[in-house]
Image: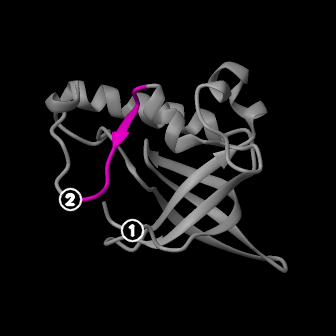
Amino acid sequence: MAKKPASFEYNGTLVRVLDGDTIDCYIDLGFDLKIKKRIRYMGIDTWESRTRDLDEKAKGLLAKARNKELLEAGVFKIKSFGTGKFGRVLGEIFVSPDAVGHEVAESVDRSSDGLVSINDILINEGHAYHYEGGKKKNFEEEM
């Protein structure tokens, strides 16, 4: 397994959800400085919502909807690990346990400051699978 680069943490606010594992958001850099960036969730992959395979598309749209639902509570924390091969920020997204509900929050580990990882929630709920780069799995392989 490849070594993860050093991480940095920022607060973010949602602009839009592109799919189950990618968002556009404003990142608060402090001192009233915010930048808009595309975030690709590190360590996971979801099914494509823009494909001709109707079964995969349905599963991809469910992942996108769940991702949006988890982020609509407001401000979230981004743990950034640099940029990926397509120039997107690679990150893990954390929210308050109150934003996702007690039952969901109890199903995943918490960060040192008590937040829960959306990346982990999507995997636990079957909307995503572990992905560390390289060739993606076929939709049928993950069914």
The extreme right residue here reads: 31
| Stretch of the chain drawn in magenta | 126-133
Residue 134: which numbered mark, if any? 2
User: What is the quadrant of the C terminus in the image?
Assistant: top left
Name the residue beneath numbered marker 1: 3
Front: mark 2 or 1: 1
Measured as percent of width and height from the top left, residue 83 is found at 43, 73
Measured as percent of width and height from the top left, residue 120 is found at 51, 39
- Magenta-span inclusion, residue 114: no
Of the residues shown, which amino acid type is indicated by label 1?
Answer: Lys
Residue 104: which numbered mark, if any? none
Q: What residue do we see at 57% from left, 38% from top?
A: 68
User: What is the quadrant of the N terminus in the image?
Assistant: bottom left
Measured as percent of width and height from the top left, residue 16 is found at 56, 51
Residue at mark 2 to residue at mark 1: CA–CA distance: 15 Å
Vertical arrangement, residue 82 with respect to residue 92, above or below: below
Main SS category, magenta section: loop
Q: Which structural element holds mark 2?
A: loop
Q: What residue do we see at 78% from left, 31% from top?
A: 98
Q: What residue do we see at 28% from left, 42% from top?
A: 50
Q: Is residue 53 left or right of residue 9?
A: left
Measured as percent of width and height from the top left, residue 62 is found at 42, 28
Q: Is residue 83 left or right of residue 16?
A: left
Of the residues shown, which amino acid type is indicated by label 2?
Answer: Gly
Which numbered disc, 2 or 1, marks the residue that appears first in the sequence? 1
Q: Which structural element holds mark 1?
A: loop
Q: Is residue 86 left or right of residue 136?
A: right
User: Badge 2, how many Cα within 10 Å: few under 14, some, many 20+?
Assistant: few
Residue 140 location, quadrant: top left
Q: Is residue 106 left or right of residue 22?
A: right
User: Badge 1, how many Cα within 10 Å: few under 14, some, many 20+?
Assistant: few
